[in-house]
Image (tube, helix red, strand yellow):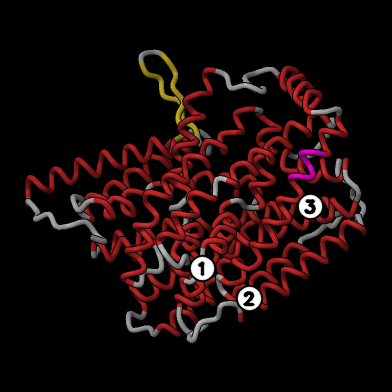
């Protein structure tokens, strides 16, 4: 169990690094500052679109590998064993997708001055309903994702011995202020510190923790014994019935990953399409890091930890096996790992609201400076909303909604991607596909008790698949059918794909 007393050494180390990134966050407003800094949405929300290979690598990695990843992946491995490693093939599959699709998307956005995926969709299809559908999906799917960063921070704050909501609220107020001040430059600069700290923590842990527990042989033996005692289909190896859900979770997650506003914000902020291609080559280094992080779940069994919730596993492991100063360093790394993605997520959601709701429906003549002002204010509202969400609703509810968010954002894939490579589909077909995929997938998830995998019985045999991927397949089938009917009723002249 975690110590209820304040760990003062760990707390002072934690505060030192938290203050350091706070100073960096406020100082970022002058970093790579453009001539119209803070007076244009491109400057505040996309850092002026001038981020090179290294900055983009840290930024995209920083908002893709979040604090909740550091907490949740080992927690899942601790709870279910090998099945929790689906995040590894998922992050392997995602980078070829980035390499093939994202440079084209960046080029289209750059030429037309698009800031969001919904901008790209409207620029292609000239459909306000489809644009609004993509924008609303992005904002709704992002909110519980921001809230889950707070879950990561809550866990480490509790591990330090602090209680109550004030420390968490204070951390997010600071985040809100420097994001308002510096925009995307703040998380981009902080990401350097965050990633360096996470790498140090993980590399130290994978060497010293097994050494203290008798080596990796003892770690795997202890984990195997723990899973055997639980019974069921958990353990160090996948069971045959887990192969299909494991594979579909990995594929569906890979397709969804760069549809989120925060990951696309990092893509749009790059200075060139070639920068994105280079990052697709270099970013798999984070997959290695993720695999090492996941092993902490097995190490917790070897350490015979007893925790209140699975999310407490990593902090409990560091509190048990490391001196307080290093535990404080590790907790600071995890907390900072929440600040970077939370900032980018709030910026991405603010960009969507400003461009695809405020400008589209409220004030079409809004100036660039007016856009930036609205986006700044909305970024504050989004953070407050996420804070209220996590303070007044059960943590499990946030996690459940995040699972739904993955399904929802995956339904934007056809609208965002198909128009980049073909000119066959109309907005009506894509909107119908989005509606059916979203409604049908959500119905299945609620029917299953908010679980990401649904079991189909075909020919008397059960087949379990990721519900989001099933919904995407249905989405695409509906798109093709509606487009076929439309073409039969009203043939359309086919022009060149967007971006050519």
Q: Is residue 38 visible?
A: no
The main secondary structure of the magenta stretch is helix
Q: Quadrant of residue 322?
A: top right
Q: Quadrant of residue 61?
A: bottom right
Mark 2: which secondary structure?
Answer: helix
**Region rendered in magenta:** 203-207
Of the residues under marks 1 and 2, which one precedes in the sequence?
2
Q: Is residue 339 left or right of residue 218?
A: left
Q: Quadrant of the C terminus?
A: bottom left
Where is residue 262 shown, x and y percent of the image?
Answer: 51, 59
Instruction: Establish if 215 lies above or below 129.
Output: above
Mark 1: which secondary structure?
Answer: loop
Instruction: Establish if 35 lies above or below 187.
Output: below
Q: Is 246 covered by the magenta stretch?
A: no
Q: Is residue 489 visible?
A: yes
Q: Residue at x 50, y 23 (%)?
A: 243
Of the residues under marks 2 and 3, which one precedes in the sequence?
2
Where is residue 233 shown, x and y percent of the image?
Answer: 62, 20
Q: Residue at x 71, y 35 (%)?
A: 295
Q: Which residue is mark 2?
A: 28
Residue at mark 1 to residue at mark 2: CA–CA distance: 13 Å
Residue at mark 3 to residue at mark 1: CA–CA distance: 28 Å
Of the residues under marks 3 and 1, which one precedes in the sequence?
1
Q: Quadrant of residue 444?
A: top left
Q: Quadrant of the N terminus?
A: top right
Q: Is residue 36 left or right of residue 484?
A: right
Q: Residue at x 77, y 58 (%)?
A: 332
Neighbour tally class for label 3: few under 14, some 14-19, many 20 plus, Cα within 10 Å: many
Q: Which residue is mark 3?
A: 330
Q: Look at discs 1 and 2 and give the one toward the viewer.
A: 1
Q: Which residue is mark 1?
A: 51
Residue at mark 2 to residue at mark 3: CA–CA distance: 24 Å
């Amino acid at each position: 169990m975690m110590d209820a007393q304040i760990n003062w050494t760990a707390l002072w180390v934690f505060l030192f690094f938290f203050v350091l990134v706070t100073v960096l966050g406020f100082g970022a407003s002058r970093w790579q500052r453009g001539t119209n800094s803070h007076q244009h949405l491109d400057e505040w929300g996309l850092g002026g679109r001038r981020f090179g290979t290294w900055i983009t690598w840290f930024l995209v990695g920083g908002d893709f590998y979040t604090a909740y990843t550091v907490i949740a992946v080992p927690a899942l491995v601790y709870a279910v064993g090998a099945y929790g490693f689906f995040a590894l093939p998922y992050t392997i599959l995602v980078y070829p997708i980035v390499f093939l699709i994202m440079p084209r998307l960046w080029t289209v956005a750059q030429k037309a001055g698009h800031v969001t995926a919904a901008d790209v969709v409207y620029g292609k299809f000239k459909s306000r309903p489809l644009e609004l559908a993509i924008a609303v999906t992005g904002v709704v799917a992002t909110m519980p994702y921001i809230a889950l960063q707070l879950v990561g921070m809550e866990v480490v704050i509790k591990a330090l011995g602090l209680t109550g909501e004030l420390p968490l609220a204070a951390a997010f107020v600071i985040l809100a202020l420097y994001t308002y001040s510096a925009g995307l430059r703040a998380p981009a600069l902080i990401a350097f510190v965050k990633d360096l700290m996470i790498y140090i923590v993980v590399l130290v842990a994978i060497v010293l923790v097994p050494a203290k527990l008798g080596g990796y042989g003892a770690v795997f033996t202890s984990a195997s014994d723990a899973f055997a005692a639980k019974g069921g289909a958990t353990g160090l190896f996948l069971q045959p019935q887990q192969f299909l859900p494991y594979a579909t979770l990995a594929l569906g997650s890979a397709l969804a990953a760069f549809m989120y506003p925060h990951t696309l914000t990092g893509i749009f902020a790059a200075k060139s399409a070639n920068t994105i291609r280079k990052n697709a080559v270099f970013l798999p280094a984070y997959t290695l890091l993720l695999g090492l992080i996941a092993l902490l779940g097995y190490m917790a069994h070897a350490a015979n930890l007893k925790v209140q919730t699975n999310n407490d596993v990593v902090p409990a492991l560091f509190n048990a096996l490391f001196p307080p100063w290093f535990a404080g360093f590790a907790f600071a790394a995890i907390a900072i790992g929440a600040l970077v993605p939370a900032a980018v997520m709030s910026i991405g959601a603010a960009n969507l609201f400003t461009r695809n709701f405020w400008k589209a429906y409220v004030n079409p003549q809004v100036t660039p400076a007016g856009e930036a002002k609205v986006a700044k204010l909305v970024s504050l509202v989004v953070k407050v909303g996420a804070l209220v969400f996590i303070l007044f609703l059960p943590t499990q509810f946030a996690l459940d909604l995040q699972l739904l968010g993955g399904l929802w954002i995956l339904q934007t894939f056809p609208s965002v991607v198909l128009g980049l490579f073909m000119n066959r589909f109309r907005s009506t077909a894509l909107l119908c596909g989005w509606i059916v995929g979203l409604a049908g997938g959500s119905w299945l998830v609620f029917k299953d008790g908010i679980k990401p995998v649904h079991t189909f019985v075909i020919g008397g045999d059960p087949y379990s698949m990721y519900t989001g991927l099933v919904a995407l397949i249905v989405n695409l089938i509906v798109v093709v059918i509606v487009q076929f009917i439309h073409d039969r009723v009203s043939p359309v002249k086919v022009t060149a794909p967007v971006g050519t």
